[in-house]
Amino acid sequence: MGKAYGPEGEAFEFERRMLGSNPEQLNSLAAWLVEQEAEEVVMESTAQYWKPVWAVLERYWKPLREEQRLWRTVTRKKYQLRRNRVRLQNQLEALLDARLPLVVG
């Protein structure tokens, strides 16, 4: 059991569990969340790894339209930042390669 504190010092207790990604374990995650009477489920992930988890959980919880739009925006921004970082890194490497003198032994 863990404990976290809100902005005004109020304490929240939480239970942390570690589960795998096979269908049986994802179903046990959904069953546990239902047992805990969870009203909201929040996920943050990169790449496509959230899709199997969401496929199991969406039977019990539906995203709000605002949340879907926000999720798409955040995912798109992460992708654009990653793409720009790779592009800039490639440009820098090309510039450094062009400036290095060729040494022939």
Image (cartoon, rainbow, N blue to C red):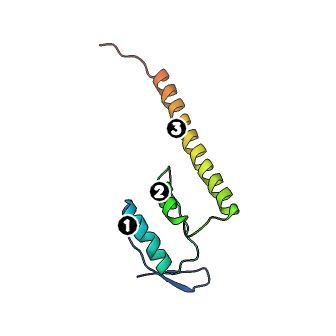
Give the label on residue 86, or none.
3
Question: Quadrant where the N terminus lies?
Answer: bottom left
Q: Please identify, in this view, whether the residue under mark 2 or under mark 1 is nearer the observer.
A: 2
As measured in the structure, the alpha-carbon distance from the residue carrying label 2 to the one carrying label 3 is 28 Å
Q: Secondary structure at mark 1?
A: loop
In the current view of this chain or complex, which residue is farthest to the bottom?
10
Q: Amino acid at mark 3?
A: Val
Q: Amino acid at mark 1?
A: Leu
Mark 1: few, some, or many residues within 10 Å (few <14, many ≥20)?
few
> Is 14 rendered above or below residue 29?
below
x, y percent for residue 9 = 57, 85
Q: Please identify, in this view, whether the residue under mark 1 or under mark 3 is nearer the observer.
A: 1
The residue pinned by badge 2 equals 52
The residue lying at 61 percent from left, 66 percent from top is 62
x, y percent for residue 81 = 58, 45
Q: Secondary structure at mark 2?
A: helix
The residue lying at 44 percent from left, 22 percent from top is 100
x, y percent for residue 78 = 58, 49
From the viewer's side, name the closer residue of 104 and 94: 94
Q: Quadrant of residue 84?
A: top right
x, y percent for residue 7 = 61, 79
User: Horizontally, is 12 left or right of 25 in the view?
Assistant: right
The residue pinned by badge 1 equals 19
As measured in the structure, the alpha-carbon distance from the residue carrying label 2 to the one carrying label 1 is 13 Å
N-terminal label among 1 and 3? 1
